[in-house]
Image (cartoon, grey):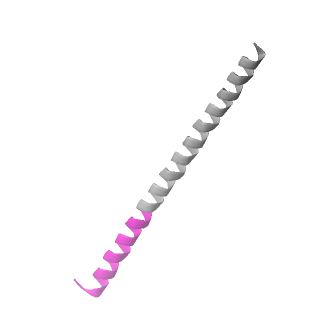
Amino acid sequence: MGARDYRAAERTAKGQLARSRGVSAGAFVGLVCLVCFVCFVCFVCFVCFVRLRAAT
């Protein structure tokens, strides 16, 4: 295995690592957005429930 082959293998490994990091970061951002959305919906439902209880 020559020096050129070694550099090519190293570049490929770095590219795969960057791609896997990008995917995990995207999944993490998606998960955070989903959790925030669910919390927001729960909060809105809770506020509506409290207002309905106060009205009756």
Side of 24 relative to 30 (left or right): left
The structure residue drawn at horizontal position 31% and vertical position 84%, both measured from the top left corner, is 4
- In x, y percent, where is residue 41? 63, 33
- In x, y percent, where is residue 24? 45, 56
* Image vertical order of residue 15 relative to residue 48, above or below: below
- In x, y percent, where is residue 32? 55, 47
Quadrant assignment, res 48: top right
- In x, y percent, where is residue 49? 68, 22
Nearest the eye: 46 or 41: 46
Quadrant assignment, res 54: top right
Nearest the eye: 49 or 36: 49
The structure residue drawn at horizontal position 68% and vertical position 31%, both measured from the top left corner, is 44
Q: Residue furthest right?
A: 55
The structure residue drawn at horizontal position 71% and vertical position 18%, both measured from the top left corner, is 53
* Image vertical order of residue 9 relative to residue 23, above or below: below
Nearest the eye: 29 or 39: 39
Residue segment shown in magenta: 1-19
The structure residue drawn at horizontal position 70% and vertical position 24%, both measured from the top left corner, is 50
Q: Residue furthest top?
A: 56
Side of 11 relative to 40 (left or right): left
The N terminus sits in image quarter: bottom left
Disc count in the image? Answer: 0
* Image vertical order of residue 22 relative to residue 4, above or below: above
Nearest the eye: 21 or 10: 21
* Image vertical order of residue 56 relative to residue 16, above or below: above
